[in-house]
Amino acid sequence: TQLLEQSPQFLSIQEGENLTVYCNSSSVFSSLQWYRQEPGEGPVLLVTVVTGGEVKKLKRLTFQFGDARKDSSLHITAAQPGDTGLYLCAGGSNYKLTFGKGTLLTVNP
Amino acid sequence: NAGVTQTPKFQVLKTGQSMTLQCAQDMNHNSMYWYRQDPGMGLRLIYYSASEGTTDKGEVPNGYNVSRLNKREFSLRLESAAPSQTSVYFCASRPTGPGEKLFFGSGTQLSVL
């Protein structure tokens, strides 16, 4: 089983601050995905990164895939209360996706 | 757009009771999945079905069985529920191909007393 470790597990910040969360593995992944989950709902895909070194931007969110395709990071600029949620990274084969344990982000007004 | 529909949304069982969680998707996806989510544990794969007619074990299959009834439906059965199976269960579907995203249902919150 390919393991994905996410850090930090919990993060509580004030509105307007920047933050970075990490997703690390000893395994190489063909692609990594980031999902966001709100209470009472299933996770929703934010982005898929495929190429080593790739950087993708989604408004205030910047996703990076490590050169060796073993790790990824999510950076949020000027966090807003609407960014509050559980951020999960996922990777794996065509059929099996393994999830990290997630980073629970709280952005306080 | 229904997407992935799970029923029931909430369920309380006594230890030893059985039940089936239902899942249906209307996106013509080949692959379907059952995950469980526990506090601090993220999402753990129970079983998956890469295509109609096939099922395979995930990370935590013990105590569960699945049936891929047709392309649309994938059910999860607890034959003899245990308190350790108290969790939130998510069904998901996915088109075939690398990098394709999972589409999740809204979950079933199950408590086993």
Image (spheres, helix red, strand yellow):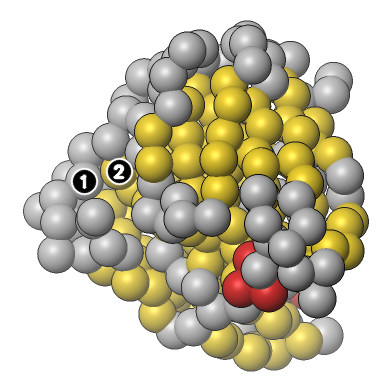
> What residue is pinned by disc 2?
A92
Q: Position of residue A82 (x, y in %)?
A: 78, 66
* 2 or 1: mark nearer the eye: 2
> What residue is pinned by disc 1?
A29
Q: Mark 2 or mark 1: name the one nearer the start of the chain.
A: 1
Q: Position of residue B80 (x, y in %)?
A: 67, 57
Label 2 neighbour load within 10 Å: few <14, some 14-19, many 20+:
many
In this rendering, the answer to whether B51 lies above or below A78 is above
What number is the disc on residue B45? none
Q: Is residue A55 left or right of residue B19?
A: left
Q: Between A57 and A31, which is closer to the camera in this rendering?
A: A31
Q: Is residue B106 left or right of residue A90?
A: right
Q: Amino acid at mark 1?
A: Phe
Q: Between A96 and A25, which is closer to the camera in this rendering?
A: A96
Q: Secondary structure at mark 2?
A: strand
Circles 2 and 1, Cβ within 8 Å, touching? The answer is: yes
